[in-house]
Amino acid sequence: MKEPILQCQNVCFSYHNLTGETSALTNISFQINKGEFVSVVGPSGCGKSTLLSLIAGLNKPESGSIFLTNPENTKIGYMLQQDHLLEWRTIYKNIMLGPEISKTINPESEKQALTLLNDYGLSRFQDKKPGELSGGMKQRAALIRTMMLSPKLLLLDEPFSALDYQTRLMVSADIGRIIRSAGITTVLVTHDLSEAIALSDRILILSKRPATIKKEIAVSLTLPDDSLLAARNAPEFQYYFSILWKEISDEYGTDSL
């Protein structure tokens, strides 16, 4: 039986300013099950990032509800598009920022940091400053900083968008593999349809603003191995891509994005 960790019911949200109101989301309902990797896609400006900010509690729905099944034991990690690493701190000190602020630095947290640095291929760079690392390395470091919070629910807002295509492929595959092996429930916002298919158990497609959930797709790929890069060669891959492309391009009233 599937165990929900997050439930959204009839969520509506609008932005307000002196000139009026802009409706962003309307009647959004879905649930995320424990251990799932779910991607959210849709037209530019449809409210994907707004949805993440609501889940994270940075904003509150105007109506409807968002609730965690076990809020006392469900920490949320939120990774933004930019790495926001502090240039004057080493990579190690950047990822230890959370424990430092919460005054929880101890042998266990230090061991966790070293383990994550090794898992993400950054152990040799822990004493470097962010400016000495490539874009992919900095994104890995930013994710480690988030993982140091031991989140049960991980929110990723276009975390690979600033990377070049080749680096994006490699970093997203590596990070996806580590997240899956850790069994962390994840919600990813992305414009990259191929990325969504390769990483996800399910994909939520939003309509144009004010966004509703237009379609939900369960992804099942036949893979020769557990490599996420292999997902792009799976026989079902083009089928899913065609569905996503049609649903989103229809929102623009054109056959192309």
Image (cartoon, rainbow, N blue to C red):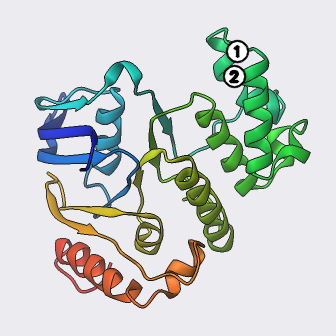
Residue under the point 74% across and 22% down:
108
Q: The C terminus is located in which quarter?
A: bottom left
Is the C-beta separation of discs 2 and 1 under 8 Å?
A: yes
Kind of residue sitting beneath label 1: Glu
Percent across and percent down for residue 133 are 82, 50
Quadrant in the picture for residue 136: bottom right
Rendering coords of residue 36 (x, y %): 38, 52
When asked about the image quadrant of residue 185, the answer is top left
Q: Name the residue under label 2.
A: 97
Residue drawn at the location 59% of the way across and 60% of the way down: 177
Examine the rendered structure and indicate whether residue 109 appears above or below residue 33. Answer: above
Q: What separation in Å lies between label 2 and label 1 (alpha carbons)?
A: 5 Å
Q: Is mark 1 on a helix, strand or loop?
A: helix
Question: In the picture provided, is 4 more to the left or to the right than 143?
Answer: left
| Residue 27, image quadrant | top left
Badge 2 element: helix
Q: In this view, does 181 lie to the left or right of 75?
A: right
